[in-house]
Amino acid sequence: MRAALTGLGWVTPLGADLAKVYDSLLAGSVAETRPIQNPETGEVHLARTVPPKLVESLARNPRLRRSSPISYFAVAAAIAALADAGCNPLTPDQAARTAVVFGVSNGGVIYTRRFYEQILKQGANSASPLLFPETVYNAPASHLAAALGIDGASYTLVGDNAVGMSALNLGAQLLALGECDRVVVVGCEEVDWIVCEAFHDWLLAPTPMSEGGSAIVLERDGPISIQTCAGVSFSSRRGAVQALRRAVEGRDAALIVSGSNGSFIDRTEREVFSPQARWLFPKHQLGEAPGASALWQTVLAALAVRARDARDALVPVVGFNQQASCVLIS
Amino acid sequence: MPDSQKRSSRRVAVTGIGVVSPLGINVRENLTGLQEARDAVSDVAMFDVSKCRSKTAGQVLADWQFPGARKEWHRASHFMAAAMTEAQSADPGFAPELAVIGTTSGGMSFGEAFYRMQASKSKDLKRASWLANYMPQKAVLDALGSSGWSTPTQIIANACASGTNALGHAFQLIRAGLHERVVAGGYDAISELVFVGFDSLQASTSERVRPFDAHRTGLVLGEGAAALLLEDWESAIRRGAPIVAEITGYGVATDNFHLTQPNPSGIGPRLAMQRAIQDAGCAVESIDYINAHGTATAFNDATEGMAISQLFGDRVPVSSTKSMMGHSLGAAGAIEAVFSILALRHQFLPPNINYATPDLSWKLDVVSNEARKAELRTAISNSFGFGGTNASLILQAAA
């Protein structure tokens, strides 16, 4: 599917300013790690989190007063992308023709873990009804639609860390269907000790886990085009190589914005691509935030094309157990 | 984009259906359950519910397993694989290009097990398997593998509207000519976290579930899966596929009133139904049956009842099949689409059981307590969820 990419926004452990974070990434800056402790076992993990002051500043929307960081990231990234596209706030007419697509992997894991902890420790009758609604995968998309005044299509997609690619593809599909004139595609994740332990146990992210959000506005016309991919499923890590090969077949670019995170994904990319290509490795600097990372890669690629640092850029993404996919920005 | 350019005029056929629900583990058992108005709600024994207000749910038989399942599979994979392979067996020549499946909680009970393990000092080796089988995509990949299919996947998590959104999106892709064949559906399996979640919101009931009844006291949860094979009509005709129904319209609306409560005006359900009818290019008068979302919570039924009443008056029979099997969340829309197809194929109205006292806030023709014979051509199936997601689908008898 093809669409035009007209607005970009992100919230990352290095900050939320498009240009400043772009420059920091190109300069090789690495986001700081912060310790996160499992209070039950005392085990400590290092994660690249969004700076607390930045998180606070994102939480001012009244609809977000009971929500967790993942919703702050979603709303902030989307508003930044719409501003970048020159349409923030949306007029009522624009909102009526705008759709939301939200991609996420772990979802509102902080509230989910807290809610289940309450069930086990305090009993089911003491679990807080304020927490449960925020555990639902589409809670951030709901807050986002409310913040933007959108009452039409809103889709939340779940999946592995290629879910951002699926979200971009669904966004391009909605434009092709004529259901809307603009799609705000958002990918987010928040970090918690349970996520760090899960990815450690599953040998999926030697790179520290991280959090944040990313948003891309898709329209039919614009100077930067994006070619999306439906994804190619695989059922074993060995099969990921073949899946990535099929996903990127016929797509070539001057710049590759890698999904490398120190896991089997690195081997997979190395087998598929030429080492001579020019590479960027944003997860080495920002960490692995499964629902957000693929869109961070995409925003970075688009900024490179927009700044004419590259004529075109390919973003390959290998998910951890579902699919390989990619987008081509030119 | 003008509507004339918006889409081609392709028709969308349903060529196979499969379903697992508390009413049965295949289409035949579910049809019998609907026709006999079976109450499939039973006591929950999977986890401790002693401190919950509700102690019952619609549950798939505890000792049932999908033949050929791997031992590490989550219960949800069994459901989804059984539904998908049943649909495939109805149309063995079907080869999907894409899978669009709805869910709300994936393999949540494995996530719970993982949390319990990580919060303890012991480290069971099973925890890596729990993780791998917890993710929402895993049940879909297991089902596709069981069917011998390998396709791209879109897993939609729009809360309780997920199944209808998955079907509706698949329908739109085929109608617009972007795909020829898509397998779509939904699944969910009961878990402690979600069960207690609805209980904490006081949305679930300790009594029988009584949709649209004046004395309704809330929902009970359910579980299951359904899969529908969707294909471009001409393509299905060309290869002689068995066409069991047609999907003709889809409407969505996002109600921004509150994360968990619908706007009391009923605007969300009303817009979704209106948009679906408009999308199908049919008249309100052509709808013969409404399979309602009908969770039996005070708020949901009030808004949906009002919206139905405003749009249709009391001319169109309405039932909530959740009265028999509970609310299967991400599976509900797909299961209820299958039930609507069964109603169209077998010319009957599925019942709304436990119904005793009409709610005088609206006038509805509720199909109370027993299935009714009826001449049906077109049905609308509603799903509404947390986050203000509202979706309606129009289904038509194959002709």
Image (cartoon, coloured by chain):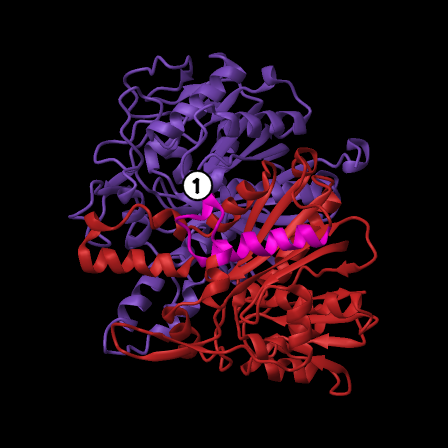
Chain colours: A red, B purple
Residue appearing at x 79%, y 37% in the figure: B1
The quarter of the displayed image where residue A293 is located: bottom right
The quarter of the displayed image where residue B58 is located: top left
Of the pair A79 and B189, the residue shown nearer to us: A79
- Could you tell me residue A70's position as x and y percent? 48, 58
Q: Main secondary structure of the magenta part?
A: helix
- Could you tell me residue B96's position as x and y percent? 64, 53
The quarter of the displayed image where residue A229 is located: bottom right
Of the pair A193 and B278, the residue shown nearer to us: A193
Q: Which residue is mark 1?
A: B259
Looking at the image, residue A1 lies above or below residue A305? above
Residue appearing at x 39%, y 19% in the figure: B367
In the rendered image, the residue lying farthest to the bottom is A275
Does residue B16 show up? no
Count of numbered tags: 1
The kind of residue tagged 1 is Leu
Report helix, strand or loop for mark 1: loop
- Could you tell me residue B15's position as x and y percent? 61, 42
Of the pair A88 and B336, the residue shown nearer to us: A88
- Residue range in magenta is A57-85
The quadrant of the image that shows the C terminus of chain A is bottom right
Is A237 placed left or right of A67 in the picture? right
Does residue A272 show up? yes
Residue appearing at x 54%, y 47% in the figure: A144
Chain ID of residue with mark 1: B
- Could you tell me residue B326's position as x and y percent? 34, 38
The quadrant of the image that shows the N terminus of chain A is bottom right
Looking at the image, residue B170 lies above or below residue A44? above
Is A281 placed left or right of A176 in the picture? left
State yes or no: residue A67 in magenta: yes
